[in-house]
Amino acid sequence: MPSFFNRRRPAIMAGVLALALGTTALTAIPGTAQPTPPVAGVALARAAGPDFADMAARVGPSVVRVMTSERATPARERTAPQEEMMRRFGRPAPEQGQRRAGQGSGFVIHADGFIVTNAHVVGDNTEVKVELADGREMAARVVGRDTATDIALLKVEAGAPLAALSFGDSDRTRVGEWVMAMGNPFGLGGTVTAGIVSARGRQIGAGPYDDFIQTDASINPGNSGGPLFNAAGEVVGVNTAIFSPSGGNIGIGFAVPSKMVQSVVAQLRDHGTVSRGWLGVSMQPLDRDLAAALRVGDAKGVVVNSVEPNSPAATAGLRAGDVITGIDGRRVETPRDLATGVADVMPGRTATLAVLRDGAAMEQRVEIGANPANVAAGKPGQPAQPSLGLGLAPRPQGGVAITRVEPGSVAAERGLREGDVVVRADGREAAQPRDVTEAVSAARSAGRPAIALQVERDGARRFVAIPLRAA
């Protein structure tokens, strides 16, 4: 459970029972003993509050433990963040050649044995196993991983139908409603915690499609990939990250909403990968001063900073200074609105953008392309090769900006960070993301074990050798 990548205060209704013991004034007859009246037993009412017992019993058989085995990173290749994670969780640093075990959570979504978990739980591991709630352990096949949303799909052959969970509508979750989390915190096995929805639409810097449900249900390392349920026992989120200076629960956890999970899982199941649309622009929010300068009044939207040559945006005639206020009827008020709106359009399809140019409203039809950062670098017709774990974007002042580094990836192991700029890839100048992906593809086609990237950070440049792992 990454810390990039809750405990509730129960509302207790205290019932106060006032017991009036009536007394009757009697004149005592001398020499007559007065009997002591019996004291009646009083049953106090149980405090009001939610009871998750029935729901936990019903959904528990569908929650699983995910166990992985990965190649240990040699000490000389480990980054400072990796060393800190090992120290924080008390894990001895394995030596080269050893294998390190990992674990997380998951849940069955189809009786045929399809299981959802987090992409960071699976990582690049060569061996993945699943332990069912009844104790059965079996090998799992990784159907696909989507690092942009941190969702992975596994498949097991159980020999019989498995109890599966149903997704709920995360768009209908409300701040303050009860939720229940289940999973495998710290390897303890099936554990149930409860809390409320603390917030929706959280952006925590995990990627361009951040849209997390925040909850104070207790989530800890090992809960990654487990389900977050609503009061009806439907999955409304996948527990993915926590915010914690200590590495343990402090009441701030994050779950990928079920609406996003369902879309990603459907593509992983059908294709093994996720295809997202690409426009080819860099953008910034539109504030009041900029709106006045661009003569768009009080409109809300995003400003196009630059248009990548030969991109779908360039082909459609978009320009720097255009203000995009909508896509296919959906309002665009932030860069994330546009990024997710474009990503939802399948490559090759046409989207209609609402644009303000020089104060005039217009509609611009754009044939959306395939995101270069999501294109696997491999030979045509062959299975996709493992990615380097990088999100890439064009940079107006030159080079290719690293916008995301997947935790546990080869790029992370070699110390690359978000904000670094790739200047050259394998001896060729890197001006667009495709320059990097094409260089990786060529190196893999030639059977080379690594590729050299020249990276700029804080004005200083250095070369970094990135291993090209086999499929």
Image (tube, grey):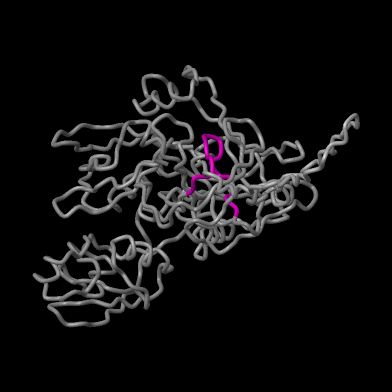
The structure residue drawn at horizontal position 88% and vertical position 31%, both measured from the top left corner, is 30
Total numbered badges shown on the rendered structure = 0
Of 123 and 384, the residue lying toward us: 123
Q: Residue at x 27, y 53 (%)?
A: 393
Residue 84's x, y, as percent? Answer: 39, 25
Q: Taking 188 as reference, is 8 above or below it? A: below
Considering only vertical position in the picture, is 201 above or below 226? below
Residue 372 x/y as whole percent? 35, 56
Please state if 378 lies on the left or on the right of 464 as rendered: right
Q: Horizontal placement of 135 versus 413: left or right?
A: right
Magenta highlight: main SS: loop
Q: Is residue 433 left or right of residue 63?
A: left
Residue at the spot 63% in from the left edge and 47% down from the top edge: 16
Q: Nearer the viewer, residue 275 or 283?
A: 283
Please provide the residue range marked out in magenta: 215-229
Up the image or down, 420 lies above or below 344; here it is above
Q: Is residue 102 above or below residue 269?
A: above
Where residue 182 sits in the image (x, y, percent)?
62, 44
Of the pair 64 and 288, the residue shown nearer to us: 288
Seen as rendered, the residue at the extreme right is 32
Q: Nearer the viewer, residue 171 or 96?
A: 171
Magenta stretch: includes residue 115: no
- Tell me residue 449's x, y (percent): 40, 33
Residue farthest to the front, as pictured: 30
